[in-house]
Amino acid sequence: MKVDRDTIRSYMISKVLPAIVACWPKEDAGKTIWIQQDNARTHVLVNDEQFACAVAQTGLDIRLMNQPANSPDMNVLDLGFFASLQSFTYTTTSTNIDELIANVEKAYWDYDASNLRNVFLTLQGCLIEIMKAGGGNKYKIPHMNKERLEAMGSLPKSLNCDLQLIESVKESLGV
């Protein structure tokens, strides 16, 4: 199967938008929903007319955005979820594409969603480090010993960001 922009757009319109509509809380209907894509040339353009027309029919405010260039650490899926699925899939044997798909689907459905809590903490840590780096990508992914903190019952639900750092970032953005 050739995966090009038309294929991605069709999938977004026929699968992703209906899934969002089905799951989005009614009380949040007026809030903007951002779908972040990496910068693959096959992805839907942020101003794509067909996608915008399909979105208009949902009654929701759904918008596309591209992640900043060279920022894989801002994609929470790349930070941990895909790696977890991939490592689980490597423990299985696939002799053809159908078995591979079945193994990936099994890994997906068997995945313990509570593991994502740690991935979002890593994302928050990356965002703080990016701000410290002035928006650049010259930083190291922070390691917080999450497993140890969790075992001790002191794993935070979210990370705090220094107020001075926030003010510094706002100043650099002219906000």
Image: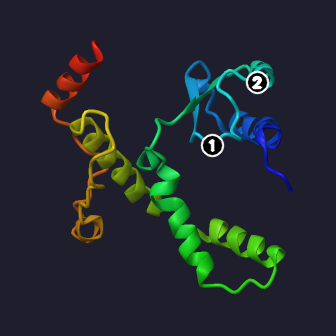
In this rendered view, identify the residue nearer to me: 77 or 22.
77
Q: Would you say residue 87 is visible in this rendering?
A: yes
Judged from this view, the residue extending furthest toward the right is 1
Q: Residues within 10 Å of mark 1 (few under 14, many from 20)?
A: few
SS state under label 2:
loop
Rendered location of residue 10, percent (x, y): 83, 38
Residue type of the residue flagged with mark 2: Thr
SS state under label 1:
loop
Q: Residue at x 45, y 56 (%)?
A: 79
Q: Residue at x 59, y 84 (%)?
A: 91
> To which residue does mark 1 refer?
40
| Quadrant of the frame with the C terminus | top left
Q: Residues within 10 Å of mark 2 (few under 14, many from 20)?
A: few
| Quadrant of the frame with the N terminus | bottom right
Rendered location of residue 116, percent (x, y): 46, 57
Q: In the image, is residue 24 above or below residue 170?
A: below
> To which residue does mark 2 refer?
58
Relative placement, left or right, of 126 versus 17 is left
Q: In the image, is residue 114 above or below residue 121?
A: below
Residue type of the residue flagged with mark 1: Ala
Q: Which mark is residue 78?
A: none
First in sequence: mark 1 vs mark 2: 1
In this rendered view, identify the residue nearer to me: 59 or 50.
50
Q: Residue at x 21, y 17 (%)?
A: 171
Separation of disc 1 and disc 2 at Cα? 26 Å
Q: Residue at x 65, y 85 (%)?
A: 92
In this rendered view, identify the residue nearer to me: 174 or 162.
174
Rendered location of residue 61, percent (x, y): 64, 20
